[in-house]
Amino acid sequence: MIKLENIKESDINIKNIWSTMLELGIQQEFTSGDIIYKQCEPSSGLVCFQEGKIKLYTLLPDGIERTICMVGTPHILCETSVIDGGTNICTAMALAKTKVVFISNEKVKRSC
């Protein structure tokens, strides 16, 4: 997970990169309780988290849910599975009205 909360107003370059990334994807909105992506499913790309609150959690083999963290904005999620081509390592659930931008693996790789 990449934290963007420490971006300074004067750091125009990072803000330009964030804006450019958002233009590559498709925005979706979720309401509280909606699943944004699921653990062990193939990653569809980066998730740029713009608004709301998200809970990241994992389900253990015995069915117990283990909360990893609560995430605020702005954040980039799923970068590990984009890099290694693997599956999502956890589940992301919206805890409030939430806006994210999904950027496909293909667009991420073409942009790098």
Image (cartoon, rainbow, N blue to C red):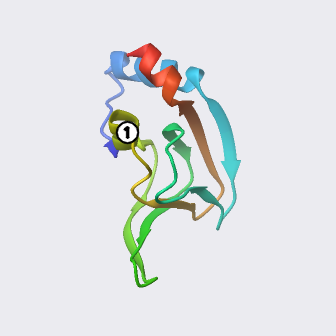
Instruction: Give the residue drawn at x 52%, y 58%.
Output: 53
Q: Residue 82: which quarter of the image?
A: top left
Given residues 2 and 109, the one toward you in this image is 109
Where is residue 77? Give x, y as percent.
42, 44
Quadrant location of the C terminus in the rendered image: top left
Q: Position of residue 67 (x, y in %)?
A: 39, 72
Q: Residue at x 66, y 62 (%)?
A: 34
| Circle 1: residue type | Glu
In this rendering, is residue 56 above or below 59? above
- The location of residue 106, given as percent across then percent down, is 51, 23
Residue occupying image coordinates x 34% and y 42%: 80
How crowded pointer 1 is (Cα within 10 Å; few <14, some 14-19, many 20+) is rated as some
Q: Is residue 4 visible?
A: no
Which is nearer the eye, 42 or 19?
42
Label 1: which residue? 79
Whether residue 9 is visible: yes
SS type, badge 1: helix
- The residue lying at 58 percent from left, 36 percent from top is 101
Quadrant of residue 25 within the rendered picture: top right
36 vs 60, nearest the viewer: 60
